[in-house]
Amino acid sequence: MIKQLSIFIQNEVGSVASITAVLKKHNINLRAIATFDTPQFAILRMIVDQPEKAKTLLIESGFAVTMSDAIAVELEDKPGVLHDVLQLIADAGIGINYIYSIVFRQKNVPLIIINTDNLDKTKQILIEKGYSVPDQEDVYL
Amino acid sequence: MIWNESKECMSRDELHNLQSARLKKTVNHVYHNVEFYRKKMQQMGLEPGDINGIEDLHKLPFTTKDDLRDNYPFGLFAVPQSQVVRIHASSGTTGKATVVGYTRRDIEIWQECVTRVLAMAGIGPNDKIQVAYGYGLFTGGLGLHYGAENLGATVVPMSTGNTQRLITMMEDFEVTAIACTPSYLLHIIEVLEEAGKIDRVKLKAAICGAEPWTENMRKEIESKLGLNAYDIYGLSEILGPGVAADCDVHNGLHVYEDHFLPEIVNPDTLEPCKEGETGELVITTLTKEALPLLRYRTKDLTSISYDPCPCGRTMARISKFKGRSDDMLIIRGVNVFPSQVEAALLEMGETSPHYIMIVDRVNNLDVLEVQVEVEERFFSDEIKELEKLNKKISSVLQSALGLSVKVTLVEPKTIARSEGKAKRVIDKRKLI
């Protein structure tokens, strides 16, 4: 499992930049970032190298932030591999809340971030099928 | 026409005597039947015998909406429940409703006052009137209804909410008069225009009230519908609609002084204002049995004139309202206090109590948006949870205010914290 930060933002010009400004100022490195929007507001999700510190700083800067778990899965870079993972999760009767992908990776393989209704079970079935599910340390490197 | 010439046109001297006699009776009534007033007067060293006429009015204690709330629900009623034939209620400032009651005689006087208003607007037994105020606990619907029936007009009790049906019946029944809020009438005009029916309307009079409106709004309504529009004023604590209304001269609203004794006071010092000077309207009921009130502070800002009116009525006129001395908003005819929003949010406990209310008028209908800060501890990672929260806040506010509310979640600490009294309301409505 890896730690991700979720931040509530209004759907307005400059909202995301006001968050990245805080990260830049404190030299926090982003590994993944994605926004999920509704007409009114959005949730910005991100994975950073220092999640606890980033959370504290962002809260101090006036944002609503929560830290939660997500699963990272390494995939081969070829057509259909993401489908195989998703089918596996679907067959297990688990719902996916959202998916996004990593910005930076050390290995030359795509890394997908998945959040589901049941993280532990998802992780377990992925590992059973031979997928690499890196932990926090592996991603933040 | 003048419905009750012997009263509406009585000489000021006669009126003075009538008011004095009725005031003495009212003071006696509350002293002996309402503990709240008896205690208040005793604390002030005042006995009913000290009040010999309206010259002594200033000696009497004031009454506020808080007093009604503190004595919720029936503490200020001056008659046994068996004599109360009707209850109305409006939403209170912090959740508790303001409850008012009427004896059969009170209802008769109420309908007499509304009948005077309708007759003043030229409405009679040959007219068909659509009453498009809400029916129910709100005094607007039933108040106009009873007055119009008393006049002998044919009442179409529309209530609010279905504008298409309203305009269909307006055309099919050849309706000649309508009673509703002025902003709703502007909306009806738009719907009529869209349906291409505006020229087929036979309306000759509109009785509009329950919210402030301007002379320009009146002119727009009159020119688009080819009718005369009249302003009716009232508040449930005193009566409901029918406390005052304007005549053909449209230079102020005649107060039915034989039933309601008006004063204008400085809202800060509570000292009387001079004639023509703007202050808070204070009303003492002179004939109410179930809920007589002494010097009730309406919080409505206006001025008064005792000059003779060209229409022949001798009753004093209050000017169009110039605002409120408190923070009450009137949205779609519904009285709303920011404290109601705050109380509802705090009670719900799933959001921060930091909010701002934005009132706007879209297509001539008032809309209320409430922006609420998402607080750290209530923030969930999931959009569906936030949307659930949004829906919950809006349904909590809707039931607290009796008004549909658009809720917008905003980032923490984005709503300005001001020193002292927070700015909670942005009213973008332009009453031009």
Image: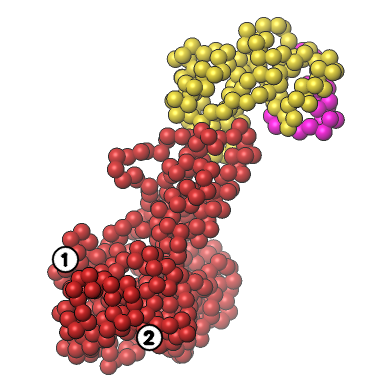
Chain colours: A yellow, B red
Q: Looking at the image, which residue is at 43% across and 77% down?
A: B101
Determine whether, in the image, residue A35 is placed left or right of residue B97. right
Question: Is B400 situated above or below A72?
Answer: below
| In the image, residue B185 lies in the stretch drawn in magenta | no
Q: Position of residue A95 (x, y in %)?
A: 76, 33
Find numbered disc 2 in the image and state the secondary structure of the residue it sits on.
Answer: helix
Q: Quadrant of residue A135?
A: top right
Mark 2 lies on residue: B109
Q: Read off the magenta span.
A: A77-98
Question: Crowdedness of circle 1 by 10 Å Cα count: few (<14), some, many (20+)?
Answer: few
Q: Residue at x 51, y 73 (%)?
A: B135
Is residue A97 a member of the stretch shown in magenta? yes
Per the image, the residue denoted by label 1 is B271
Residue A28 showing in the rendered view: yes
In this view, A39 is above or below B40: above
| Image quarter in which the C terminus of chain B is found | bottom left
- Residue depicted at 19% across the width and 76% down the height: B46
Residue kind at label 1, given as amino acid type: Glu
Closer to the observer: label 2 or label 1? 1
* Residue B235 x/y as whole percent: 37, 71
B37 w.r.t. B17: above or below: above
Give the answer, above or below, for where B239 lies relative to A39. below
Quarter in which the N terminus of chain B is drawn: bottom left
Crowd around label 2: few <14 · some 14–19 · many ≥20 (10 Å):
some
Q: Residue furthest bottom?
A: B6
The chain that hosts pointer 1 is B
Q: Position of residue B331 (x, y in %)?
A: 43, 59
Question: Looking at the image, is mark 2 or mark 1 earlier in the sequence?
Answer: 2
Q: Nearer the viewer, residue A14 or B138?
A: B138
